[in-house]
């Protein structure tokens, strides 16, 4: 943030002022400083996001029932705080950037990041620290290599004959032992004791022999994969908030009296929706659900995510209904051939943003809980990173679907579903397509969730 502030403030680091309508382009050095700042943010974010939620949840003791309940609330309020920040940045900071300049607009977040760092380190004496267990990627590779080396050995029927250290704690630092499971028996070969392994005086080589806990770590990741994959489709739906919802809003009436609402600013309603739903969920829905389900958090993580996927179907359906009404009005007023906004208030988009916010607090927060609770103790940050990866892949999937739809619907010189002039297109078909994909994704998710076997730790 400091680099971006300097890039926007120091004359030598920013392009020269525009002269009339002529704006000089930036020099290669100015571009380099600017993009260096952006990539530093990406690098820093990669360190913060997967670890901050895991580190926060580590402060709660899983063996204490009251702390387990508070840990569930932590994920809700953690997401709440993120959206408070998003609301401030998309309103106050944007106003500062527009009215006081980019230097100050970048400088304020830089100052607050400095305060955040000071606040974070000031709490060091209070934190509970989990011992780092080393690279999880290395441990997974060791299991694959060891099981391949022992591919000709048979796995004993009695799982107690598989290799595991006899101590109370796991061989992996900071991790509890994991109970053996009967799936993916081919990986169990990594824990089979061969004659060479049992020779006295031989130091155990983890590339040849792995503990049951180490093998179970990889099994857990594989079992989580189908649940993880369904999050990609949800993220593709979520990506519409900043793409197709904005395109739809640009073709609607954006005025209130003399004030014009920028269509992109309507995404603020999603943030406000999250801020509204989190307290309702944590203080109202969870206690009510708890009386029916008997679960500490009201719903299991899998149930919570499933509800969010269902709401995402309703969100896309609501967007399609609004578009049907908009196109109907365009035809009635003879605006089909004109690239102009239809006199339908942009506030008709609020329900779809509101539903998206509700889906977000069920699915995204459910993902945070699921990938933390179900991941092996020494792989929580990695699994949190995997859950965040669905957002990136969802955006790529959204772009891929849009490209395929555009290619197929514009054959033969047709305008297609999403032409430049949306009044002659069928954006509603695109929304129905996403609603259908979301429904199929939900069905797949339910099947995978029913088959999913929970982690069993000692």
Image (spheres, helix red, strand yellow):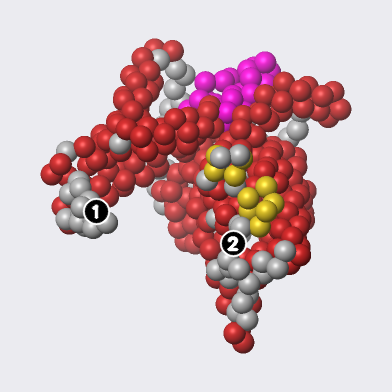
User: For the N terminus, which image quadrant?
Assistant: top left
**Residue at 71% across, 43% down:** 351
Name above or below for residue 359 compared with residue 93. Answer: below
Q: Is residue 93 magenta?
A: no
Residue 58 highlighted magenta (yes or no): yes
387 sits left or right of 130 in the view: right
Among the 4 quarters of the image, the one containing residue 185: bottom right
Quarter that holds the C terminus: top right
Which residue appears at 75% of the width and 33% of the height?
299
In this picture, residue 106 sits left or right of residue 63? left
Observer-nearest of 305 and 153: 305
367 left or right of 332? left
Q: Residue at the far right: name it.
A: 292
User: What residue did someone put label 1 on?
Assistant: 20
Q: Which residue is mark 2?
A: 340
Structural distance between the alpha carbons of marks 1 and 2: 29 Å
Looking at the image, residue 386 lies above or below residue 92: below
Residue 222 position in % (x across, y down):
59, 52
Span shown in magenta? 53-80
Q: Is residue 315 above or below residue 9?
A: below
**Residue 3, position in %: x, y?**
24, 38
Q: Secondary structure at mark 2?
A: loop
Residue 145 in view, yes or no: yes
Q: Main secondary structure of the magenta part?
A: helix
**Mark 1 residue element:** loop
């Amino acid at each position: 943030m400091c680099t971006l502030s300097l890039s926007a403030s120091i004359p030598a680091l920013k392009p020269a002022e525009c002269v009339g309508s002529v704006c000089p382009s930036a020099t290669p050095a100015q571009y380099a400083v600017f993009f260096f700042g952006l990539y530093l943010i990406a690098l820093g974010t990669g360190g913060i996001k997967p670890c901050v939620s895991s580190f926060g949840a580590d402060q709660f003791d899983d063996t204490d029932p009251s702390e387990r309940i508070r840990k569930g609330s932590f994920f809700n309020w953690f997401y709440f705080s993120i959206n408070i920040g998003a609301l401030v940045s998309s309103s106050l900071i944007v106003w500062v950037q527009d009215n006081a300049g980019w230097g100050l607009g970048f400088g304020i977040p830089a100052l607050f990041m400095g305060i955040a760092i000071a606040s974070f380190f000031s709490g060091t004496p209070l934190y509970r620290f989990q011992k780092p267990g080393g690279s999880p990627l290395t441990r997974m590779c060791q299991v694959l290599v060891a099981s391949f080396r022992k591919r000709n050995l048979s796995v004993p029927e009695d799982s107690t004959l598989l290799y595991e250290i006899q101590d109370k704690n796991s061989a992996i630092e900071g991790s509890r032992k994991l109970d053996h499971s009967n799936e993916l028996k081919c990986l169990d070969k990594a824990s089979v004791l061969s004659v060479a392994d049992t020779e006295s005086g031989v130091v155990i080589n983890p590339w040849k022999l792995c503990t049951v806990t180490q093998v179970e770590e990889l099994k857990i990741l594989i079992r989580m994969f189908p649940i993880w994959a369904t999050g990609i489709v949800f993220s593709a739906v979520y990506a519409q908030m900043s793409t197709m919802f904005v395109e739809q809003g640009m073709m609607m009436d954006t005025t209130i009296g003399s004030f014009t609402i920028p269509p992109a600013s309507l995404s603020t309603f999603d943030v406000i929706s999250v801020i509204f739903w989190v307290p309702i969920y944590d203080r109202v829905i969870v206690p009510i659900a708890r009386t029916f389900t008997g679960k500490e958090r009201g719903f299991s993580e899998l149930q919570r995510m499933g509800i969010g996927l269902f709401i995402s179907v309703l969100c896309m359906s609501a967007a399609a209904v609004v578009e049907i009404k908009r196109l109907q009005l365009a035809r009635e007023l003879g605006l089909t051939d004109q690239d102009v906004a239809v006199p339908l208030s942009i506030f008709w988009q609020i329900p779809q943003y509101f539903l998206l916010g509700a889906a977000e607090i069920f699915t995204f927060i459910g993902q945070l809980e699921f990938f933390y609770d179900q991941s092996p103790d020494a792989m929580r940050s990695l699994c949190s990173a995997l859950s965040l990866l669905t957002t990136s892949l969802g955006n790529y999937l959204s772009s891929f679907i849009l490209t395929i739809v555009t290619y197929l619907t514009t054959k033969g010189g047709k305008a297609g579903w999403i032409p430049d002039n949306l009044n002659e297109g069928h954006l509603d078909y695109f929304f129905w397509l996403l609603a259908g994909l979301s429904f199929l994704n939900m069905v797949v998710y339910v099947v995978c969730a029913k088959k999913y076997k929970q982690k069993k730790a000692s």
